[in-house]
Amino acid sequence: MRDFQAMTDFTIEELQLAARNHGLPLEALRYPITPVGLHFVLTHYDIPAVAPQDWRLQLGGRVARELTLSLEDLRARPSIRRPVTLECAGNGRARLSPRPLSQPWLEEAVGTAEWGGTPLRSLLEEAGIGESAVDVLFTGLDRGLEEGVEQQYERSLPLEEALRDDVLLAYEMNGEPLPPQHGFPLRLLVPGWYGMTSVKWLQRITVLDQPFDGFQQRDRYRLRQEEDEAGPPVTRIQPRALMSPPGIPDFLSRMRTLDLVPTVLEGRAWSGWAPIAGVEVSTDGGGSWQPAELGGQAATWSWTSWRYPWEPEAPGTYELACRARDEAGNEQPVEPPWNLGGYSNNAVQRVTVVVRST
Ligand SMILES: Nc1nc2c(c(=O)[nH]1)N[C@H]1C(S)=C(S)[C@@H](COP(=O)(O)O)O[C@H]1N2
Ligand SMILES: [Mo]
Protein backbone atom coordinates (compact mmCIF):
# COMPACT_ATOMS: atom_id res chain seq x y z
CA MET A 1 0.00 0.00 0.00
CA ARG A 2 1.13 3.51 -0.74
CA ASP A 3 0.43 6.56 1.36
CA PHE A 4 -1.49 9.47 -0.10
CA GLN A 5 -1.43 13.08 0.90
CA ALA A 6 -4.38 15.33 0.22
CA MET A 7 -3.04 18.55 1.67
CA THR A 8 0.09 19.88 0.07
CA ASP A 9 2.29 20.98 2.87
CA PHE A 10 5.14 22.04 0.56
CA THR A 11 4.22 24.15 -2.47
CA ILE A 12 4.83 23.36 -6.15
CA GLU A 13 7.16 26.39 -6.28
CA GLU A 14 9.32 24.88 -3.54
CA LEU A 15 9.31 21.54 -5.35
CA GLN A 16 10.37 23.27 -8.59
CA LEU A 17 13.37 24.78 -6.82
CA ALA A 18 14.19 21.58 -4.93
CA ALA A 19 14.24 19.56 -8.16
CA ARG A 20 16.75 21.98 -9.75
CA ASN A 21 18.97 22.64 -6.76
CA HIS A 22 20.12 19.39 -5.24
CA GLY A 23 21.85 18.73 -1.93
CA LEU A 24 24.66 16.44 -0.79
CA PRO A 25 23.24 12.95 -0.14
CA LEU A 26 24.32 12.67 3.50
CA GLU A 27 26.05 9.31 2.99
CA ALA A 28 28.46 11.29 0.75
CA LEU A 29 29.85 12.89 3.94
CA ARG A 30 32.15 9.84 3.79
CA TYR A 31 34.30 11.51 1.07
CA PRO A 32 36.79 14.11 2.37
CA ILE A 33 36.57 15.76 -1.07
CA THR A 34 33.05 15.66 -2.41
CA PRO A 35 32.81 14.14 -5.90
CA VAL A 36 31.61 16.88 -8.28
CA GLY A 37 28.16 15.38 -8.96
CA LEU A 38 27.43 14.95 -5.24
CA HIS A 39 28.31 18.55 -4.25
CA PHE A 40 25.22 20.67 -3.57
CA VAL A 41 24.07 23.08 -6.31
CA LEU A 42 22.21 26.36 -5.89
CA THR A 43 21.39 28.48 -8.94
CA HIS A 44 18.90 31.35 -8.63
CA TYR A 45 18.05 31.70 -12.34
CA ASP A 46 19.21 29.54 -15.30
CA ILE A 47 22.67 28.13 -15.97
CA PRO A 48 23.93 30.56 -18.66
CA ALA A 49 25.32 29.41 -22.01
CA VAL A 50 29.01 30.37 -22.34
CA ALA A 51 31.27 30.05 -25.41
CA PRO A 52 34.72 29.79 -23.76
CA GLN A 53 36.61 31.24 -26.75
CA ASP A 54 34.48 34.43 -26.68
CA TRP A 55 34.32 34.75 -22.91
CA ARG A 56 36.32 37.53 -21.22
CA LEU A 57 36.61 38.76 -17.63
CA GLN A 58 36.43 42.56 -17.32
CA LEU A 59 38.01 44.28 -14.32
CA GLY A 60 37.19 47.96 -13.95
CA GLY A 61 35.78 50.72 -11.75
CA ARG A 62 38.09 52.52 -9.31
CA VAL A 63 41.31 51.09 -10.72
CA ALA A 64 44.33 52.63 -12.45
CA ARG A 65 44.00 50.34 -15.53
CA GLU A 66 41.05 48.31 -16.71
CA LEU A 67 41.89 44.69 -17.50
CA THR A 68 40.29 42.27 -19.96
CA LEU A 69 41.34 38.66 -19.54
CA SER A 70 40.64 35.47 -21.44
CA LEU A 71 40.51 32.06 -19.83
CA GLU A 72 44.04 31.39 -21.20
CA ASP A 73 45.28 34.64 -19.59
CA LEU A 74 43.87 33.54 -16.23
CA ARG A 75 45.28 30.02 -16.53
CA ALA A 76 48.74 31.47 -17.27
CA ARG A 77 48.75 33.31 -13.92
CA PRO A 78 50.00 31.80 -10.61
CA SER A 79 47.63 29.06 -9.51
CA ILE A 80 46.61 27.65 -6.14
CA ARG A 81 44.39 24.76 -5.12
CA ARG A 82 42.65 24.22 -1.82
CA PRO A 83 39.82 22.23 -0.27
CA VAL A 84 37.03 24.57 0.81
CA THR A 85 33.72 23.73 2.47
CA LEU A 86 30.89 25.65 0.82
CA GLU A 87 27.44 25.88 2.40
CA CYS A 88 24.29 27.69 1.27
CA ALA A 89 23.06 30.36 3.68
CA GLY A 90 19.57 28.88 3.26
CA ASN A 91 20.63 25.49 4.61
CA GLY A 92 18.13 24.49 7.33
CA ARG A 93 15.36 26.76 5.99
CA ALA A 94 12.78 23.98 5.58
CA ARG A 95 12.97 23.24 9.31
CA LEU A 96 11.73 26.73 10.23
CA SER A 97 8.18 27.47 11.26
CA PRO A 98 6.72 29.48 9.66
CA ARG A 99 8.84 28.58 6.66
CA PRO A 100 9.97 31.38 4.30
CA LEU A 101 9.15 30.35 0.70
CA SER A 102 12.42 29.72 -1.12
CA GLN A 103 14.73 26.78 -1.75
CA PRO A 104 13.58 24.32 0.98
CA TRP A 105 16.86 22.86 2.23
CA LEU A 106 16.79 20.49 5.21
CA GLU A 107 20.52 20.27 6.09
CA GLU A 108 22.21 18.95 2.95
CA ALA A 109 23.29 22.20 1.17
CA VAL A 110 27.01 21.63 1.68
CA GLY A 111 30.06 20.16 -0.02
CA THR A 112 33.85 20.33 0.05
CA ALA A 113 35.58 20.53 -3.31
CA GLU A 114 39.18 21.17 -4.15
CA TRP A 115 38.97 24.53 -5.91
CA GLY A 116 41.77 25.63 -8.20
CA GLY A 117 42.40 29.03 -9.72
CA THR A 118 44.33 32.25 -9.40
CA PRO A 119 44.34 34.59 -6.38
CA LEU A 120 42.04 37.61 -6.80
CA ARG A 121 44.41 39.84 -4.87
CA SER A 122 47.26 39.89 -7.41
CA LEU A 123 44.82 40.72 -10.21
CA LEU A 124 43.39 43.65 -8.23
CA GLU A 125 46.90 44.85 -7.47
CA GLU A 126 47.86 44.61 -11.13
CA ALA A 127 44.87 46.78 -12.03
CA GLY A 128 45.90 49.27 -9.33
CA ILE A 129 43.27 49.77 -6.62
CA GLY A 130 42.14 53.40 -6.42
CA GLU A 131 42.46 55.27 -3.13
CA SER A 132 38.70 55.75 -2.82
CA ALA A 133 37.98 52.01 -3.18
CA VAL A 134 35.93 50.34 -0.40
CA ASP A 135 33.99 47.50 -2.01
CA VAL A 136 34.42 45.04 -4.90
CA LEU A 137 31.41 43.94 -6.96
CA PHE A 138 31.25 40.56 -8.72
CA THR A 139 28.74 40.21 -11.56
CA GLY A 140 27.62 36.89 -13.05
CA LEU A 141 26.32 36.19 -16.54
CA ASP A 142 23.01 34.79 -15.30
CA ARG A 143 19.94 36.96 -15.44
CA GLY A 144 16.48 36.74 -13.90
CA LEU A 145 13.74 38.40 -11.87
CA GLU A 146 13.11 38.45 -8.14
CA GLU A 147 9.92 40.05 -6.87
CA GLY A 148 9.65 41.80 -10.26
CA VAL A 149 13.18 43.21 -10.12
CA GLU A 150 15.17 42.15 -13.21
CA GLN A 151 18.84 41.66 -12.50
CA GLN A 152 22.15 40.03 -13.14
CA TYR A 153 23.20 37.89 -10.17
CA GLU A 154 25.75 40.12 -8.44
CA ARG A 155 27.15 40.65 -4.97
CA SER A 156 30.06 42.51 -3.44
CA LEU A 157 32.74 41.98 -0.83
CA PRO A 158 34.33 44.67 1.36
CA LEU A 159 37.77 45.50 -0.07
CA GLU A 160 39.68 44.06 2.92
CA GLU A 161 37.93 40.70 2.47
CA ALA A 162 38.52 40.74 -1.30
CA LEU A 163 42.23 41.24 -0.61
CA ARG A 164 42.53 38.15 1.59
CA ASP A 165 45.17 35.76 0.24
CA ASP A 166 42.80 32.79 0.00
CA VAL A 167 40.08 34.45 -2.13
CA LEU A 168 40.18 32.72 -5.50
CA LEU A 169 39.07 33.20 -9.05
CA ALA A 170 38.42 29.49 -9.59
CA TYR A 171 38.43 27.74 -12.95
CA GLU A 172 38.84 24.20 -11.58
CA MET A 173 36.85 21.94 -9.28
CA ASN A 174 38.51 18.69 -8.14
CA GLY A 175 41.20 19.10 -10.82
CA GLU A 176 38.76 19.46 -13.75
CA PRO A 177 37.43 22.58 -15.50
CA LEU A 178 34.35 23.88 -13.64
CA PRO A 179 31.20 22.07 -14.77
CA PRO A 180 28.38 24.31 -16.10
CA GLN A 181 26.32 24.15 -12.90
CA HIS A 182 29.23 25.29 -10.70
CA GLY A 183 30.11 28.40 -12.71
CA PHE A 184 32.02 27.55 -15.91
CA PRO A 185 34.32 29.10 -16.96
CA LEU A 186 35.16 31.16 -13.84
CA ARG A 187 33.73 31.78 -10.40
CA LEU A 188 34.64 33.62 -7.25
CA LEU A 189 35.42 31.45 -4.21
CA VAL A 190 35.43 33.11 -0.79
CA PRO A 191 36.49 30.53 1.83
CA GLY A 192 34.62 30.78 5.14
CA TRP A 193 31.67 32.76 3.76
CA TYR A 194 28.25 31.35 2.94
CA GLY A 195 27.85 30.35 -0.72
CA MET A 196 25.95 33.40 -2.02
CA THR A 197 29.24 35.35 -1.92
CA SER A 198 31.00 32.98 -4.33
CA VAL A 199 29.54 34.38 -7.56
CA LYS A 200 29.46 31.86 -10.44
CA TRP A 201 29.83 32.56 -14.20
CA LEU A 202 31.83 35.71 -13.50
CA GLN A 203 31.86 38.30 -16.25
CA ARG A 204 32.83 41.51 -14.46
CA ILE A 205 34.65 42.73 -11.36
CA THR A 206 34.05 46.37 -10.44
CA VAL A 207 35.97 48.21 -7.74
CA LEU A 208 33.55 50.65 -6.04
CA ASP A 209 33.99 53.77 -3.92
CA GLN A 210 30.87 52.97 -1.88
CA PRO A 211 29.28 49.76 -0.62
CA PHE A 212 27.18 47.99 -3.28
CA ASP A 213 23.47 48.28 -2.58
CA GLY A 214 21.91 45.83 -5.09
CA PHE A 215 19.08 43.33 -4.57
CA GLN A 216 21.19 40.38 -3.34
CA GLN A 217 22.91 42.66 -0.85
CA ARG A 218 20.08 44.85 0.46
CA ASP A 219 16.89 42.81 -0.01
CA ARG A 220 18.36 39.34 0.45
CA TYR A 221 20.93 37.81 2.81
CA ARG A 222 20.00 39.96 5.81
CA LEU A 223 18.96 38.66 9.22
CA ARG A 224 15.60 40.40 9.65
CA GLN A 225 12.75 39.80 12.07
CA GLU A 226 10.59 42.50 10.39
CA GLU A 227 10.25 43.55 6.72
CA ASP A 228 11.10 47.19 7.43
CA GLU A 229 14.38 46.70 9.28
CA ALA A 230 17.75 46.65 7.49
CA GLY A 231 19.11 43.70 9.50
CA PRO A 232 22.77 42.65 9.70
CA PRO A 233 24.18 41.08 6.52
CA VAL A 234 24.73 37.31 6.35
CA THR A 235 28.48 36.73 6.01
CA ARG A 236 30.42 33.77 7.42
CA ILE A 237 29.31 30.19 7.92
CA GLN A 238 27.98 29.29 11.36
CA PRO A 239 29.32 26.03 12.84
CA ARG A 240 27.53 22.80 11.98
CA ALA A 241 28.13 19.08 12.42
CA LEU A 242 26.34 16.53 10.26
CA MET A 243 26.13 12.77 10.65
CA SER A 244 26.06 10.17 7.90
CA PRO A 245 22.78 8.52 8.85
CA PRO A 246 23.71 5.00 10.08
CA GLY A 247 22.05 1.74 9.10
CA ILE A 248 19.65 1.40 6.17
CA PRO A 249 16.80 3.74 5.19
CA ASP A 250 13.14 3.11 4.62
CA PHE A 251 12.60 4.23 1.01
CA LEU A 252 9.80 6.70 1.66
CA SER A 253 10.24 7.97 5.22
CA ARG A 254 14.07 7.65 5.26
CA MET A 255 13.70 6.27 8.81
CA ARG A 256 16.82 4.27 9.68
CA THR A 257 17.03 0.63 10.79
CA LEU A 258 20.11 -0.61 12.62
CA ASP A 259 21.13 -3.98 14.06
CA LEU A 260 21.92 -4.31 17.77
CA VAL A 261 25.71 -4.45 17.34
CA PRO A 262 28.55 -2.02 18.12
CA THR A 263 28.58 0.71 15.48
CA VAL A 264 30.48 3.91 14.71
CA LEU A 265 28.62 7.18 14.14
CA GLU A 266 30.54 9.38 11.69
CA GLY A 267 30.25 12.71 9.98
CA ARG A 268 31.87 16.08 9.27
CA ALA A 269 31.88 19.47 10.98
CA TRP A 270 32.85 22.97 9.85
CA SER A 271 32.66 26.67 10.66
CA GLY A 272 33.54 29.78 8.67
CA TRP A 273 34.58 31.74 11.78
CA ALA A 274 37.33 29.58 13.29
CA PRO A 275 38.62 25.99 13.35
CA ILE A 276 36.32 23.37 14.89
CA ALA A 277 37.03 23.01 18.61
CA GLY A 278 34.77 20.04 19.31
CA VAL A 279 31.87 17.86 18.20
CA GLU A 280 29.50 16.19 20.66
CA VAL A 281 27.08 13.37 20.04
CA SER A 282 23.84 12.51 21.79
CA THR A 283 22.06 9.17 21.49
CA ASP A 284 19.15 10.17 23.73
CA GLY A 285 17.64 13.09 21.83
CA GLY A 286 19.90 15.72 23.34
CA GLY A 287 19.52 14.65 26.99
CA SER A 288 23.25 13.95 27.36
CA TRP A 289 26.25 14.68 25.14
CA GLN A 290 29.56 12.87 24.69
CA PRO A 291 32.64 14.15 22.85
CA ALA A 292 33.43 12.69 19.41
CA GLU A 293 36.97 12.15 18.09
CA LEU A 294 38.03 14.73 15.50
CA GLY A 295 39.99 13.75 12.40
CA GLY A 296 41.44 17.22 11.72
CA GLN A 297 40.96 19.79 8.97
CA ALA A 298 42.85 19.51 5.67
CA ALA A 299 42.85 23.31 5.37
CA THR A 300 41.57 26.21 7.47
CA TRP A 301 38.21 26.49 5.71
CA SER A 302 37.71 22.80 5.07
CA TRP A 303 35.57 20.49 7.20
CA THR A 304 36.91 17.96 9.72
CA SER A 305 35.77 14.36 10.06
CA TRP A 306 34.49 13.12 13.43
CA ARG A 307 33.62 9.67 14.80
CA TYR A 308 31.86 8.29 17.84
CA PRO A 309 31.75 4.55 18.64
CA TRP A 310 28.27 3.59 19.88
CA GLU A 311 26.92 0.39 21.36
CA PRO A 312 23.15 0.58 21.63
CA GLU A 313 22.09 -1.14 24.86
CA ALA A 314 18.76 -2.58 23.81
CA PRO A 315 16.42 -2.73 20.83
CA GLY A 316 14.23 0.35 20.47
CA THR A 317 13.98 3.81 18.95
CA TYR A 318 16.83 6.28 19.50
CA GLU A 319 17.15 9.93 18.55
CA LEU A 320 20.74 10.64 17.56
CA ALA A 321 22.07 14.19 17.39
CA CYS A 322 25.41 15.94 16.87
CA ARG A 323 26.60 19.46 17.48
CA ALA A 324 29.77 21.43 16.75
CA ARG A 325 31.46 24.40 18.35
CA ASP A 326 34.35 26.43 16.98
CA GLU A 327 37.40 28.06 18.52
CA ALA A 328 35.72 31.47 18.37
CA GLY A 329 33.11 30.17 20.85
CA ASN A 330 30.23 29.77 18.36
CA GLU A 331 27.99 26.78 19.13
CA GLN A 332 25.07 25.17 17.38
CA PRO A 333 21.70 26.03 18.93
CA VAL A 334 19.12 23.37 19.83
CA GLU A 335 16.25 25.52 18.53
CA PRO A 336 16.33 26.99 14.98
CA PRO A 337 17.24 30.71 14.96
CA TRP A 338 14.31 32.24 13.03
CA ASN A 339 14.56 35.13 10.56
CA LEU A 340 12.43 36.28 7.62
CA GLY A 341 14.76 34.98 4.90
CA GLY A 342 15.37 31.64 6.60
CA TYR A 343 19.16 32.08 6.66
CA SER A 344 21.87 30.32 8.66
CA ASN A 345 19.67 27.94 10.60
CA ASN A 346 22.38 25.77 12.12
CA ALA A 347 20.20 24.05 14.71
CA VAL A 348 21.44 20.54 15.60
CA GLN A 349 20.65 17.67 13.23
CA ARG A 350 18.51 14.85 14.61
CA VAL A 351 18.40 11.35 13.17
CA THR A 352 15.86 8.81 14.40
CA VAL A 353 16.99 5.18 14.25
CA VAL A 354 15.21 1.96 15.12
CA VAL A 355 17.61 -0.61 16.61
CA ARG A 356 16.41 -4.17 16.10
CA SER A 357 17.66 -7.28 17.88
CA THR A 358 19.85 -9.59 15.86
N1 LIG B 1 26.07 33.88 -10.75
C1 LIG B 1 25.57 33.23 -9.69
N2 LIG B 1 26.39 32.91 -8.68
C2 LIG B 1 25.92 32.25 -7.60
C3 LIG B 1 24.56 31.92 -7.48
C4 LIG B 1 23.71 32.27 -8.57
O1 LIG B 1 22.51 31.98 -8.56
N3 LIG B 1 24.25 32.92 -9.66
N4 LIG B 1 24.11 31.30 -6.34
C5 LIG B 1 24.91 31.52 -5.13
C6 LIG B 1 24.51 30.71 -4.00
S1 LIG B 1 23.15 31.25 -3.15
C7 LIG B 1 25.23 29.63 -3.57
S2 LIG B 1 24.82 28.81 -2.16
C8 LIG B 1 26.41 29.16 -4.32
C9 LIG B 1 26.28 27.70 -4.66
O2 LIG B 1 27.41 27.24 -5.34
P1 LIG B 1 27.41 25.80 -6.03
O3 LIG B 1 26.15 25.69 -6.85
O4 LIG B 1 28.63 25.72 -6.82
O5 LIG B 1 27.39 24.79 -4.90
O6 LIG B 1 26.61 29.90 -5.52
C10 LIG B 1 26.38 31.29 -5.40
N5 LIG B 1 26.80 31.94 -6.62
MO1 LIG C 1 22.87 29.91 -1.26
Image (spheres, rainbow, N blue to C red):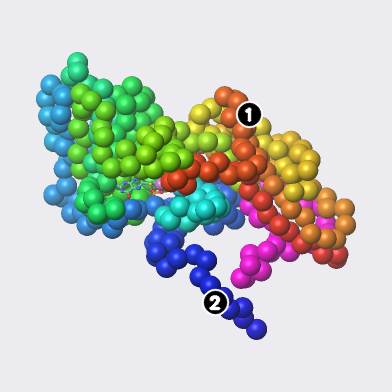
Q: What element carries label 2?
A: loop
Q: Quarter of the image containing the N terminus?
A: bottom right
Task: Name the secondary structure under disc 1.
Answer: strand
Left or right placement of residue 79 versus residue 258 in this view: left
Residue 6: numbered disc: 2
Image: magenta residue range? 244-266
The residue lying at 56 percent from left, 28 percent from top is: 275
Placement of 300 over or under 26, stated as above or below: above
Image x and y of residue 89, in percent: 45, 43
Amino acid residing under circle 1: Ala
Q: In which quarter of the image is the C terminus?
A: bottom right
CA gap, disc 2 to disc 1?
46 Å
Q: Residue at 36% across / 31% down in the picture?
A: 167
Q: Position of residue 356 (x, y in %)?
A: 82, 64
* Direction left: furthest residue: 65
Q: Which amino acid does label 2 sit on?
A: Ala
Q: How many labels does the image show?
A: 2
